[in-house]
Amino acid sequence: MSETIAAPAPRIGFVSLGCPKNLTDSELILTQLSAEGYQTSKTFEGADLVVVNTCGFIDEAVKESLDTIGEALAVNGKVIVTGCLGAKKIAARADGTTAAGQDEPETLVKHLHPAVLAVTGPHATQDVMDAVHRHLPKPHDPFLDLVPGAFGTAGLKLTPRHYAYLKISEGCNHRCTFCIIPSMRGDLVSRPIGDVLKEAKALFEGGVKELLVISQDTSAYGVDVKYRTGFWDGRPVKTRLLELVQALSELAAPHGAWVRLHYVYPYPSVDEIVPLMAEGKVLPYLDVPFQHSHPEVLRRMKRPASGEKNLERIERWRALCPDIVIRSTFIAGFPGETEAEFEDLLDFMRAARIDRAGCFAYSPVEGAAANALEGQLPAELREERRARFMAVAEQVSMDKLRERVGATMQVLVDSAPALGRRGGVGRSYADAPEIDGVVQLLPPEKASKTLKVGTFTRARIVGTQGHDLIAQPV
């Protein structure tokens, strides 16, 4: 009787580019691929097919995505493209047809890389799977197999196992003039609160110690469904950020885990969340995209918040929770920005003492309404203002870091070679992964003290180094 040897499972190379929201889309696709029996890898070589999840927000991201697609085609040849760049169309000719002679607008990706097998937009798991099935048939029935390495119903994650992103909504209702995200991801669509909490529970039970809540507009969670009441664990829960944060804190508490909020617009409703931070139910950390301070610039940007009130709001948050850390992003050199308006931004940074700040020199994005505004500034001036802003922001940040010297803080360990006997790297509540600084952990003074990735340790802050803290485990 001859023995049947099973054929190796098809292998798919996968590359995820862009923001954490893109990362969660990638995790959904990878979970489905694994559920259907496909193997996945981070390399193009040896793969039967490659999927590239792209970013299309700013010019540098578009270039990176197009270069990666080109590399994947050169190395592998069989490529499916998804993500924000996949939604970008090229302009039609005067007769209404595209350069390819088609009635429908051609995607930028297909125009520049006609050899790709398929192109989809963002948040399109099923479209990606349909394209995979056409070019690499699935090996088995997904209902008969488990997903190795997954967090139960939360699926696979591309982050280290001790932290994970939790996307609570898709799309955005705002029409900021510099942004094209709504044209790629659509209007706000909030996930059912029961589904969000089910995923969070699976992640905490799987060992996640830090849950990072993300969306395009976290503060607006539930607006599209008029904050309707959903159900979780047999009880009614309103689809609103306050109730979501309260429920997440309850789920996190038995595991001693952190909950961190990102992309929080500075609406008055955020004032209800800050007391929960003061009570230790959620990390006292807010990622708030202010973008600018001057009311006229914000008006040209069509931002949903008022510049005059943002400083008052920050002062109120700090009165409610003195330990709160605020991170933000800003744009320098926006069309029409005068020197006086830019100086207003610098004054705001000094007065608000933003703990962590990033800044982009304004870059015209194809399809953005800001491209038509008067007063486009030269690239050299935009870059010069970005550098001036960062000089102020870095000084504010380093001054605030020095204030922590002598304090003892809880640190989540991200790296600990040799059980930390040679030191390690971690993060405090003030440090989100990838975008903020870190805590450089010195070798423990006690021989019995060890460090383990994904666990917490107490550490005494003994110094600073650039954007980082230096600490002695205790």
Image: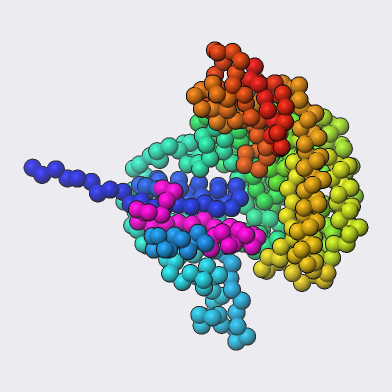
78 versus 231 height, above or below: below
Given the current orientation, which residue lies at the most extreme bottom position?
95
Residue 319, percent across and down? 86, 32
Residue located 77% across and 54% down the image: 386
Q: Nearer the viewer, residue 416 or 135?
A: 416
Residue located 83% across and 69% down the image: 375
292 versus 275 height, above or below: below
Q: Nearer the viewer, residue 171 or 372?
A: 372
Residue 84, percent across and down? 58, 60
Q: Quadrant of the N terminus?
A: top left
Q: Nearer the viewer, residue 358 or 171?
A: 358
Quarter of the image for residue 116 reads: bottom left
Residue located 19% across and 45% down the image: 5
Residue located 74% across and 41% down the image: 356
116 versus 223 height, above or below: below
Q: Quadrant of the C terminus?
A: top right
Answer with left or right where residue 319 lies relative to residue 244: right
109 versus 344 height, above or below: below
Answer with left or right where residue 276 lies relative to residue 425: right
Q: Is residue 168 magenta?
A: no
Answer with left or right where residue 350 lies relative to residue 39: right
Q: Which residues are magenta?
A: 41-66
Quarter of the image for residue 406 reads: top right
**How many dots with numbers?**
0
Residue 248, percent across and down? 64, 33
Answer with left or right where residue 286 lies relative to residue 317: left
Q: How is the image coloured?
A: rainbow
